[in-house]
Every structure is written in structure tokens, then in C-alpha cells.
Image (cartoon, helix red, strand yellow):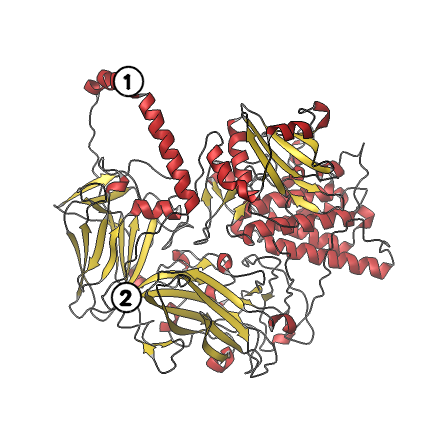
Amino acid sequence: MWLGDSGKSSLMAAADELDSSLPSTIPYMTARVFTVDTVYNFTVNPKDRHWLRLHFYPSSYNGIAPEDFRFSVSTSTGLTLLRNFSVWVTTKALTQAYIVREFSLPRTPAGFIAVTFTPTPTPMTNVTYAYINGLELISMPDIFEDPATMVGFADQTVDIAASSFQTMYRFNIGGGYIPPSNDSGLARSWFDDTPYVFGVMQGVSYTAGPRFHVKYPTEASEYAAPVEVYLGTRSMGSDPRVNQNYNLTWTMEVDGNFTYVVRLHFCELLLNRPNQRAFDIYINNKTAQSDADVIEMTSERGVPVYKDFAVHMADDPGDEVMWVAMHPSVALRPQFYDAILNGLEVFKLNDSAANLAAPDPVPSKMLAEAELSESEKERSKKSKDQANMATVIGGTAGGAAAVGIVAAICLVVYHNKKNRELTGSDSHNSGWLPMYHSTTSGKSSGHLAANLAGMCRHFSIAEIKTATKNFSESLVIGVGGFGKVYRGVVDGDTKVAIKRSNPSSEQGALEFQTEIEMLSKLRHRHLVSLIGFCEESNEMVLVYDYMEHGTLREHLYNKGSNPPLSWRHRLDICIGAARGLHYLHTGAKYTIIHRDVKTTNILVDENWVAKVSDFGLSKSGSSTVNQAHVSTMVKGSFGYLDPEYFRRQQLTDKSDVYSFGVVLFEVLMARPALSPQLPRDQVSLADYALSCQRKGTLPDVVDPTIKDQIAPECLIKFAETAEKCLADQGLERPSMGDVLWNLEFAMQLQDAFDGASGRRQAQDDGSGSGRPVLEPSNSYGSTASVTTIGTSSTSRAHDACVVIEEDDDDITNRAAFSQLVQPTGR
């Protein structure tokens, strides 16, 4: 429960602007501003550790500009938490809307904790201001009592219980985001680890079923991590030959010249005997533990355990990245060459000077240059309007009135988790380091294009006009909100598609900018390739690889000029498009949400390989912390638009999943997403398809041209997958990785049916797609049946997920199968 504070040496103020990315208005829209040292005193139980969370939102408060706030924060024990800290600089560098810093403070015999805010002069002025939006103090159980082993020094340990530390990372490995309300009583946020898994070998994720029971060894250990962390895991996969040739690795950026504690959470979900799975653990290329065996640690399946290791990060170049890696044990020769991990936390310990503070982050070079360019434009605009501005001020100043707004800082103190009630801030982006990524509207900037020119070719306008015969209407192959698309030829014989922006389109300018940013950094077999661009003579042009067979839609129900696609072609194209979307969501540095998935944005090349295209509406996330959603203006195409996104204006990768579900039914039924001429209950393809699926009449509305080609089992799996994609709530939809897995499994069912009936066409289906044939393998038991894939897995680049249901102690009686597919590189 958030409580108001009071104080005489401070100002109460409200934020001038509301950012739509904030999880709630409380505590971020009110602040207490300090001009002198100000202390918050708390009476606490001297036997308890405490979480201390500081919430900051950069804004103007009481007329004070956000860049004028700079301050330090310390405690009564002499611990420095923040030094010369600028919320404005930090949020700009990290492109975040707000910041939460989480610290853990050791027991204090004095029975009180004082938190002091000390304003410090800004670089340009001697004015001193500090502020705080929200402060949480939460008592902790004893989950940091045992010392951590120093990596590389077996005889040395670090006393965590006596240390103060800052939370740097907290991951639910192989699972999704866990909000504070679902934590085990300590209001922590657990984030998806996918953006931090290193390399193309991502392993596989699997999740235990609802009947699997996690048995905490003691009551106190429940606080170490919630059940959801231990019910999911990431492993290396089922192929021992592959596993022995790579490390399952995570990388994280940290501050130099500090010691860190790395806490690894384990819970064996499949095996129940020692030496069935054993592995080595490495931190920064040093052996943290050899031959780790979870069953040896716990004696049985389903019992959680964690291991703490300490490592010192020097302040040398290259030491700002921490590596945590796992590799199957060679010495023990276990039954399965594999490794697992359920959760990972990284904490920065105070140094010998009782300091946890680090310098403010530095913006990236591109971001700094973009900010400088915008600043120069703003100064130029102001100088032009200076004379007129003087007149305006003179005419209006006398009529202005000041309105005083009194707002209190929001303060929360937790004494006991059982008496605590969480309200107001249980948003998906609650956590210690929220992510925020904004876009700038307006015309395309030549400065931005110059920054990206090295990533793709820059065409002159003369080359573009030559390629399109001066934008001849006879070469137009498509028209959209951005403008027209032309067929062209460059370099003598290279066919290209040339997209020309409509000069009067403000949206087109922004989409032009977005596509260059996105596609210049992405390379994948199932994404359309950006060859180059032209930004010259008020023209904005993008040049792509030419897709010989056009859009998927042209081959579904424009049957006058194109023969209908076979079912195998359609399924293969769906699999290719799913791979491209899965890569966008999890395989790139940033999570990318396409936001306009539809059959006209899935192109097909001369070999019938599917390519996802048109990234003008795409939104990107952060590589720092995985966020559950991005708040943004609703954009997309009606008929494909996620209803949850439309209602809440919160965009997630599950919005793409919904749109792709519409595509799947469109492929199956060969009818548009919207058909206004049909009866009311059939206008929306999504609604009509779901109704047919639930009534059991879907086979009756399948495209007649392919109805006899589809294996019954394949149709069931395909329809179930599409149905799950169209779940009303995003949390109930599968990840794109799960969709991909299910579609590939549907293809296996089709293959088996065609082979058994002798109907398999003697061809490579004309696709040339190189589609891999997955062979289900049960590496942990003798016989296995395939279970329904859950939706909690979020894995990268063709990860598979298996759901484990436990009816008895013999794991071989239930499904226990996973499949590792080596992904296509970028």
C-alpha cells in the first residue's frame, strides 16, 4: 500500500507530462523535491535484511527542468547507493521511461534505517535539486545466509549476509516474465532470459505441467524464488553430439571494479537418479563448479536448490561483460550429455569503501549524434521565431494565472509479507529496470539515413529513375499507405522491388525511417532483404530483393491469374513465415514486433520461400531487460488487429501471434480477413473460423481446392494452433516459437500420412525451401507420446518446448521429448 510522506525542507510537486509507458500513475506522477540534504528515517526489525527500491520518473517538477536534478543517495550505515546521479541522463542513455533501483541492506543492530538524499550541483550551474517519486522498504527472510564461493579460488568465500548489494539481473530461465504480484512474497520482477542467451545455439525450453509438484526443502526456501521459476527450465537439447560441442551461455553487461554474486537456481523436472545429467558451470571462462548434478544436490526430482558464486569484475576494457556458461560433464560420462538452469540472479556487492554507485551510463554514439542533430534544429527554429515570440509573450503574460498543485511523494514500507497488500503498480513493466523505446514522428532525417548508410547501399535518385524508367506506371506492382512499389532492374540484370514514399505522407516518412533502421540490421532467410535506399531530391525510396511470386494472398483467392497453391505449399510457406517472425521476436539483438502481419506482407520468392516484409509499423524493444509490452498508438490492419492491443493500446509480441493466427485460417479457408458482403456472423474471418472450430464444422469450410490433400491429423494440429493464436488475452496465446514448433509437427503428420497412403508427391514440392524434417526423439525414456505444447516457453531460433505431466514417479510413463533444431544464421 502506497502512503504519502511529509516534510518541511522539501517541495511537493506533480510531473508536467504523463508518459504512456508508465505502469501506473502511482508513484510516478508525484514527487518530493529537495534543495538541501533530506533524510527519511525508518524503524526496522534489527534481525531482518531489507529490500530498498527507489522509483524515479524524469520530468519537470515545480518548473525545474529534469536535467537540473542531480543528487546522491546514501544510508545511515555510510553506504553510498547513488553518487552524482542524473535520472535524466540515465533514462536518455538507456531509452527508458522511468527507473527503479533495487538494493538489499544487511541487518542493522541500531533498529533503524535512514536514507539521505543529497543534491549536488549540475555541470552547468550551481543549482542543486534532488527528488524521489517512490520508495519501498521491504523486510526479507534469510535467503542470503550462506557465503558464496569465489570463482577461481576454491578456498575463498564472500560473506553475502554482511554485505549490501544492488540487483543487476533477475531471470526466469526458459520462461516468461513474472510480475511482482506473482513473486513468492517479496514483490520482485523476474524477466525472460531470451535476450541474454549468447550465440545461435539457444538450447530448448520446457515447462512442467500443472500437476507437477515443487517440493521446497524448507519453508524459508520458498522465498528464494517463486514456484513458476522452478517449473520451467532451459536445457541444451536432446542431441549429445551437438551438446558436447557448444556451451549454453548467457552474457550480461555490468559495472567494472566490483564483486558480483551470481545465484543459479536449479530444479530437476525430468530425471530422478544421480549421474543421469551432470554438467560443468563456468563464469567468465573460469570453472565455478565441475560435475554439477542436481539430483546429487537434492536427492530427488522436483526439489529446488540454488548455488551462489562470487566473481570480481576488473575495470579493464572487456571486463564490463559477464559470461555464465554450462557444458555437459565429460569426466563423469553421464547418461545424458546435457545441462539445465531454471533461474539466474546477479547482485553487485558494495566495495571496500562502502560504495555501490557507478557513473551514469553513456549514450550510444548514434543516439548522441541524433540528439545533437535534433538540438541544433531546435535552436535554429527558436532563433527564427524569436521576434514573434516577444510579441506573443507581451500580449499574454498579463492574463496568465498560476495554479498551485500540491502532490505528495508516494512512500511504501513493508514489514511483513503476509500483512502486505500490493496495489496500483502490478503492471507488466514493474521491475528494477524497466524498458522504454520511443519513436520520433516527423519527416525522415538525412542525418539518420547517413548514420545507417554503411549498413546498406545508398542509391542516387538517377539510379532509381533508371531502374524504374522514371517511375513508370507500367512497372507498379503494389500500392500501400507508404506509397507505390515498382519492379525494377539495377546493375544491368538484378531484379529489385522499389518502394517509393508518397511525398505528402507524414506516416510514410516515419515508416521509411523505421524500415531502414530495422532491415539494415537484420539478415534472415525468411525476412525480405533490404538492398539499399535513396533519400535525395525530396524522394524517399527503399530497394529490396525482388520476390518473383509476389504475395501469399495472390495465391490464395486471386485465382484468375494464379492456380491455387497445394496444401503442402501453403503449410511450408506458413512455416517459413513463422520462422521469420520467431527470429524477429527472439533472434535479433532487440525484440522486434512486426505489428502488421498479414498475407500481403508475406512474400514468396522464385523458390517458393516465404519472406516476411513491410517493417514500416514495426516497434523494437530493448536489449537491457525484457518488457512485457510497449504502450503505443494502435496501428495495423483491420481483420488482423489484436483485440487486446486495440483495447489497451499495449503492444506485445503476442499481437503478432494473433495476426498470424488470422493468416493461418486465411490460408486454410482461402477467404479474406474481412468480407463485408457476407452475413454478419461471417464478416470477420477470425470470429467465423473460431466459431466453426468450436462447433466442429471447420472441415466443412476448408478451401475445396485443398480439402482432399490435408491429412486429418494435420488439419487438427493446424487448426488447434491457429485457434490458440486467436485467444482473446495475449497471455493465453502461444509464443511464436511454439507456433513454429506446432506447424513443423503438423508437417510431420502430413508427411507420415502421405507416406503411409502412397500419396507423397515425387517432388521437393517446388518450394526449394530446405525445410528440415524433425524426428521426434525421446532422449529421457523408452517410449514417449507428444503432449500439447504450452504457451509459457519463450525460446529463440527454433527452440522446442515440452510440457511435462506427472502422474507417477516413472518419468518414462509420460511425454518427455524435446527437439533441438540448429537455427539458420542471420
Q: Residue at x 23, y 71 (%)?
A: 47
Tell me if I can see residue 582 in this picture: yes
Q: CA distance from mark 2 to mark 1?
A: 55 Å
93 is higher (above) or lower (below) than 750: above
SS under mark 2: loop
Task: Indicate which label's residue lies in the foreground, 2 or 1.
Answer: 1
Q: Residue at x 84, y 56 (%)?
A: 760
The x and y percentages for residue 40 are 18, 55
Total numbered labels placed on residues in the image? 2
- The local crowd at label 1, few if under 14, some if 14 to 19, many if 20 or more residues have their Cα within 10 Å, is few
- Give the camera-side residue of 399 and 250: 250
- The residue at the far left in this view is 8
Q: From the viewer's perspective, is 751 left or right of 32?
A: right
- Asked whether residue 421 appears in the rendered view, the answer is no
Q: Position of residue 414 (x, y in %)?
A: 27, 59
Residue occupied by mark 1: 387
Residue type (three-letter) at the residue carrying disc 2: Asn
- Could you tell me which residue is drawn at 23 percent across and 18 percent down? 396
Q: Reply above or below: 688 against 266.
A: above
Q: Is 615 placed above or below 769 here? A: above
Q: Are marks 2 and 1 in contact (CB under 8 Å)?
A: no
Tell me residue 143's x, y (percent).
Answer: 34, 71
* Residue named by callout 2: 350
Which quadrant of the figure has residue 752?
A: bottom right
Q: Name the element at disc 1.
A: helix
Crowding near the residue tagged with mark 2, few <14, some 14–19, many ≥20 C-alpha atoms within 10 Å:
many
Instruction: Indicate left or right for 34 with 193 as reference.
Output: left
Left or right of 574? Residue 186 is: left
**In this rendering, position of residue 534 left or right of residue 60:** right
What type is the residue that disc 1 sits on? Ala
Residue 632 lies, with reference to residue 254, above or below; the image says above
